[in-house]
Amino acid sequence: MIANTQIAVTLQGGRFELTQRDPLKRDLLWPQKLQVAVGYPTGSRQLTVDLNKATARGVLDDPHPLYVLPASGGLGYGDFVLDEVSRRYFLDHLEEIPGPLTRASALVVLWEELLDARVRPTDFLRLVERALPNEHDEQNTQLLLSDLSSVYWMFFNQQDRLAHAPALEALLREGISRAQATSQKSAWFSAFRSIAQTREGVDWLTRIWRRDEKIEGLPLAEPDEIALAGALAVREAPGWQQILSAQLARTQNPDRKARFEFVMPALSADPKIREQAFERFRDVNNRRRESWVLESLNYLHHPLRAQHAERFIRPSLDLLREIQRTGDIFFPKRWTDATLSGHRSSEAARTVQDFLIERGPKLPERLRWVVLSSADDLFRSAGPSSRPF
């Protein structure tokens, strides 16, 4: 979604400027105090800038800083637009910046720049690949791993994903081996499970699920094995049907067992069975356990199944009024998130656009914003021409 304010950084001689504008052209300002980090070869300096008008300035110790980072303390609102010098430095040297909070703040700003097409997906991916082995802060590592999975599925087509997969899988397996704490190993393994696509990677996950191989220091609980079985089924690993059946029999917790049995049709490699899995959601009685429904939708719309799942987008959006009437207050947003999060094609974006044109004027304002918010990543990944505004 468009932020209420855009804050651009410019360097001018011995100073920097933060210039604020309203992208919705309402001439509104967003007053706030921002911490700004300025990097030099000798170290960094933290400044506080009072942005209470359209432009605020700060003095530089050196007219040629390595970078200027607004919201470096992790607090700040807006779409931050870096100057080209700072953007290039972060892409090439993020892991060299001292201070985990500054690195995290820079990564968040770069992600927003990626969403706004000011950073190329390949440049962002290279940054993450380079930074991950050098990051020692656990929270930053988890942020990098999350961004890795997001950029991989959101901004690359399947051909490009397969080209990147071998190197990424090797990177993640090294990270699993290197991690000391169980929580760290779990984060690295979850990222591997998310992106694995090579035959070797899928075979390794299969051996782990079958308990033929173990990861030292990472015991897998029942929910982990259920998630692993789902990941293998979506990838149509050899014997996926037997894996699902065996996982159902293996699951001891009765609630997890019932949930997994409910979700299993959405995991099928048979398109007809997946279509039947979706059709049952037209009946409110099959939507009572909303978390089960959302998990099913996430599998139906997994990026590897996205082309087939495009047929479910319009019916899902057409159900929104009923979803709002019969479900939890948060269910419409979660339903729409699960429906759209796995898609990146212009065809999927066009389906949402057509819905907004045809049904948007009659939708309650809250539901219209639900659709726009949930479709934001889709519009961005499908390209600027897909944006409805």
Image (tube, helix red, strand yellow):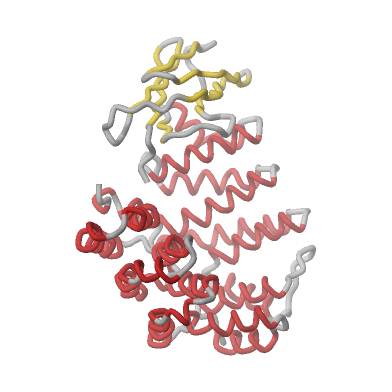
Residue at left 48%, top 69%? Answer: 298
Across and down, in percent, residue 39 comes to: 56, 22
Most foreground residue, 91 or 72: 72
> Which of the 4 image quadrants contains residue 207?
bottom right
- Whether residue 68 sits left or right of residue 271 in the image: it is right
**In the figure, 282 relative to 139: above or below?**
below
Most foreground residue, 238 or 333: 333
Most foreground residue, 265 or 107: 265
Q: How many marks?
A: 0
**In the figure, 127 relative to 349: above or below?**
above
Across and down, in percent, residue 388 comes to: 25, 51
Residue at left 48%, top 25%? Answer: 32
- Whether residue 382 sits left or right of residue 332 in the image: it is left
Whether residue 6 is visible here, answered yes or no, is yes
Whether residue 162 is visible here, answered yes or no, is no
> Which of the 4 image quadrants contains residue 196?
bottom right
